[in-house]
Image: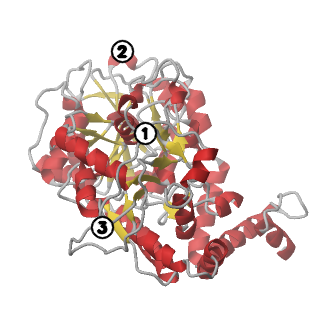
Amino acid sequence: MADCCTNHVNNYRCQPGQSLQYLKYEKCELKIAALAISVAAEDAKEQIEQLVSQEFGKSGKSNQINIELQEIVFVIQSQSNSFHSKRAEDLERNILNQAEELGKELPRVLLIHQMDRHDGAWTILPLMQDFSASYGRNSSWIFFCEEDTRIQIVKLLETLRRFDKSKRFSEYKNDHTVSNQKSIEPSILSSDSGQHQVPQRERTEQEWFLGKALYDEESTIIHHYAFAENPTVFKFPDFAAGWALSIPLVNKLANRLKSEPLKSDFTIDLKHEIALYIWQKGNGPHLTPVPEFCTDDLNSFKAVHCATMFSNFLPVCGDLVKKEDIFVAVKTCRKFHRDRIPIVKQTWEGEAALVEYYSDYAETSIPTIDLGVPNTERGHCGKTFAILERFLNHSSSKTPWLVIVDDDTLISIFRLRKLLSCYDPNEPVFLGERYGYGLGTGGYSYITGGGGMVFSREAIQKLLASKCQCYSNDAPDDMVLGMCFSGLGIPITHCPLFHQARPMDYPKDYLAHQIPISFHKHWNVDPVKVYFTWLAPKMEDSFTEKKQRRIREDL
């Protein structure tokens, strides 16, 4: 048993049939996972010291580390919900602890949800003028990451130095073809009293946009069918791997925003839209792919080569939420009773304990419930608000969660039960895939309905008590809800595991590090196959949940 576990840690995977029964294999896996966490914690300092020694030697270059740390502003794309804010704060501490291990001055770490004077701060671009004003003269890079991104500071410094003209720019340029790069004069050191004072030296002069590159294999509706003739040519960053903007580019974007305010428009896929804005129809830089920006798991053999990694497992924060604690409302209408409802019954209905189908026609064989709201071709706001009122007034007061889905939404209730273990139903929670409208000019965020909208009972109580309501039955329900919650000061909570579109509408590399909870639309796909390929509960789901729970108990 010891040899098996030792070999596994050394990248030789034990197979269940290799002289070990399944039970022993499971124990081995659990020990390995616990050991990996323990080793990572105990050896963090040693790894950092080794990297510093290998990269910088003992020739006084540690001062350079300090300068470079001070020249990076870390921005965590955080959220205000208590679960997410804690994860972001944990990452902030990790970054600062790594810097402290180096014995140098701590870098600046910003959490986007704390920039609350910007309702659309999560869309990044409205912050560019603030970034330029605060850091445009004494920093070199703004590095963005998600709350589950993991960063190796020394490796990140090594990676960014390749793009610094004063170090290895010419070497890197020989190895990589980078188009549309422009240079500007280096800025003068800021003397603002509230800023870090960094010794003057030649800094990055190029307009760099760095990240792990994603691309569409075919044109997709979520990107408005951009680059339809060859969508693979346009690259955009995977936020999970982290992405970076050089300060000259930040300053350029800030100046552009002064003269050309953001349009009052929709934000659907932020990473694609930011890349489009920066590219500026060929007048700005393309994304430069950086192989050290990774989304591999922390325990991957590739991790040693990565400056960033990603925790790509579904969070489990305790016992799964009970089936009886989730009420699922399906919006449908008479014309879809025969083709869409049977798909729901073949796929995810069996995962749910409480399901009701709301239609414009009562049909006992399904059964459907007529809410007395006429069907509309679009919007469905009247129907959605009737569902909210019915849940509050007719369901058990002990049922803390409501999920509203379309009749062509495919969803994993089992995985949703895992995810909801991380949220407090006593808080007003409105959860799903976040979109935005007019956020550059005082708009609001909303949860797009097709991927599923999750409400805590507390959120619904506050919403209905506010008397905020539809302006018409066919108003867009998801947008009206976003407007209402925005007026109440209740934040929209984003989870990228919910999807408004089909699997084929997303880059393969993007889905590769996800455990999805939902997809939407039956168009040109076999929805039953999509469900059983992407969403159906599997044996490993149960095994992983047990393993994570036992590891937590061991620690």
* First reached walking from the N terminus: tag 3 or tag 2: 3
Q: Nearer the viewer, mark 2 or mark 1?
A: 1
Looking at the picture, does residue 81 appear above or below residue 533? below
Assess whether mark 2 and mark 3 are in contact (beta carbons under 8 angstroms). Answer: no
Residue at the far top in the pictured view:
335
For mark 3, what is the residue?
189
Using the image, tell me which numbered label, if any, was put on residue 335: 2
Q: Return the x and y of residue 379 as percentages of the image width and height.
A: 24, 26
Residue at the far right in the pictured view:
19
Looking at the image, residue 32 sits to the left or right of residue 365; the answer is right
For mark 1, what is the residue?
285
Residue at (84, 73) in percent of width and height: 1
Work out whether residue 267 or residue 410 is closer to the camera in this orientation and state it: 267
Q: Return the x and y of residue 246 as percentages of the image width and height.
A: 40, 53
Is residue 407 something one can see in this rendering?
Answer: no
Assess whether mark 1 and mark 3 are in contact (beta carbons under 8 angstroms). Answer: no
Work out whether residue 396 or residue 31 is closer to the camera in this orientation and state it: 31
